[in-house]
Amino acid sequence: MDNVGHKKTLRTSLLVGLLALLCFSASQALGKEVAIGVFAYQGERASTSDWNPLISYLNRALPEHHFRLENHDAESLRQAIAGERIDLAITNPVHYITMEAEFGLSRIATLESVGVSAARALGSVVLARSDRTDLKELTDLTGKRVAAIAPDAFGGYLLAAQAMLHSGVDPETDLKEILFIGLPMSRVVEAVLQGKVDAGIVRACVPEQMVREAQLQPADFRVLSQRQEKQFPCALSTPLFPDWPLSVTRQTDPVLAKRVAHALLSMTQAADGMGWTVPADYQPVHDLYRELRVGPYAYLREITPEGLARRFWPWLLGTLVALVAWITHTIRVEQLVHRRTAQLRESLQAREQAESRMRESQEQMEHLSRLSVLGELSGNLAHELNQPLTTIGTYARTVLRRQDSGRLTPEAINEACTQIVSEAERAGGIVQRIRHFAKKRGAVRAPVDLALIAKEARHLFIGMLAHPPTIHIDNRLPEHCRVLADGPQIQQVLLNLIKNALDAGRNLAPERHRVQVIIEAVDNWVHLHVIDQGCGLEPTQLARLFEPFFTTKPDGLGLGLPICKTIIEAHGGRLWAEPNADGPGMRFSFSLRCHDLPT
Ligand code: ADP
């Protein structure tokens, strides 16, 4: 009995296994199950009755697959796509572009109704009660209460919101209130008719359907900013947008996607006029979202750094590029300025060095020139020193003689000593003057008295020469006019000019040895003229007068006048020569600026 029972159980198990195998093979033969997720915005019942004809058609057209309808609200459809639980999705354009951005949903066909273009199938209508004559255009909604389906309803809010924005009314700030009262859409129409709100937003064709179903009378309502669209059977307040797409997910088998697309496009329009066509362009939906800053463009509202970065990246990029360009430019300019400054500093240093070398050599030349004047005068200098020395010797000898003869009185000693002291002082003064004249020194600028300098020069010549010439000084300078100069340098110039003037008259009659020095003011300048009645100069000699080493004297150096010219020009003045206008000889002149200085 046990054995028989055991065999029976074994047979039953085998039968069950066989049946399971058969069922599995049958399901394999029927093909893979294909889940179509649908956004059931009007509820499951309405959705199932709307989409069942399509499911049946696909099951007939593609018998190797088993198509199954899954009703979802927006969020659960999103999760089904995210969890890869559905193969195909049917949803409204707004939800579609959100899922496209988030999960790469890709449309393969767009719903098409009879006589309506798939690309221009959805619109909104904004209604008001017909007795509200104050509400004709969307602009009239400012400060009014408006009802709509939901903030994310495409036909039931967003399309009208964009149209309002375009007409200058911001639905978020310019309305008194916006009430989202949900589905069914007839509730919005009822709220308008009952006067709970001033106007209501519903999907286009909803009022016409309600009229057909006797829920509404055409005379009960008016359409704001009404517009006519070709081949569109209903009243509209907004432009038209593409109809619902059917799309595949990233995981959908491409072969299945191709077969479904083919089946949809070959589908003859159903009894309710529903059919499918090639996928429409959903860019206008993207534009609407971006403008309203909702869905995938909600980040445009965020004031987070990331939101701002995503929103303003072209400007940020531009600013960054400009900033980098500016920094590069600044660094370049800095480097350039640095380099130029260094070059300038170097050239200034070089100039300073050259100037200092020039100053040194000028001082050297000047010194040499002084020594040359001194050398020329040295013969007479010996004679000059000889006089006091002879006198000293004579007095000393007289004292000795008187002492020998016993005639030395205290008066005689006193007189002899007084004379000896006086003559020794005279000799010391000559030596002192020469030492002072020959001393080497640097250039300075101080107020100088030209007449005084001329007198000192005259004194030097008269004191040193055996046959002193006549040097007449005519000072016509007003009291206040002074010259700022290096006194010894100007004296040097004057000595040179006087020496040349005396040289020019050397072999001539004594009356032509006369030299005249005139000092006068001309405008803001002081002119000093040295006029002689000497041999004068040929025009060819006059032309070469200031050339270095030009000389007509056998023992001349030809450096005196070039040095004088350099000195005067270094003082900002001018040195020139011309024939004497009042007789034979030459007139040498120099000018120096006159300063109004307190005397
Ligand atoms: P140097 O006296 O050693 O010759 P200068 O430069 O002082 O050098 O003078 C150059 C030349 O200019 C002189 O040799 C002389 O021929 C001429 N000269 C200068 N002053 C006079 C003057 N007052 N009259 C005529 N010739 C002059």
Image (cartoon, rainbow, N blue to C red):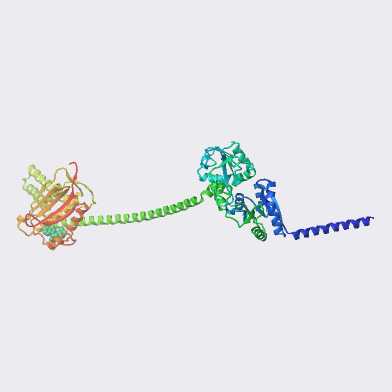
Residue 35 seen by the camera: no
Residue 472 position (above or below residue 131): below
Q: Residue furthest top?
A: 195
Task: Judge from the rendering whether residue 395 lies leftward or rightward of residue 563; answer left or right.
Answer: left
- In the rendered image, residue 250, in percent from the top left (x then y), is placed at 64, 56
Q: Is residue 335 left or right of residue 152?
A: left
Give coordinates of residue 367: x percent, y percent. Answer: 21, 55
Give residue 586's quadrant in the image.
bottom left
Q: Quadrant of the rendered structure where residue 117 is?
A: bottom right
Q: Is residue 540 left or right of residue 313?
A: left
- Quadrant (top left/top right/bottom left/bottom right) for the N terminus: bottom right
Q: Nearer the viewer, residue 130 or 300?
A: 130
Residue 513 in percent (x, y) is at 7, 55
The residue that appears at 76% across and 58% down in the rendered structure is 27
User: Is 153 left, or right, of 526 in this rendering?
Assistant: right
Closest to the observer, 60 or 39? 60
> Is the C terminus in the top left, top right, bottom left or bottom right quadrant?
top left
- The answer to whether residue 57 shows anywhere in this view is yes
Which residue is more in the foreground, 218 or 42?
218
Q: Quadrant of residue 365?
A: bottom left
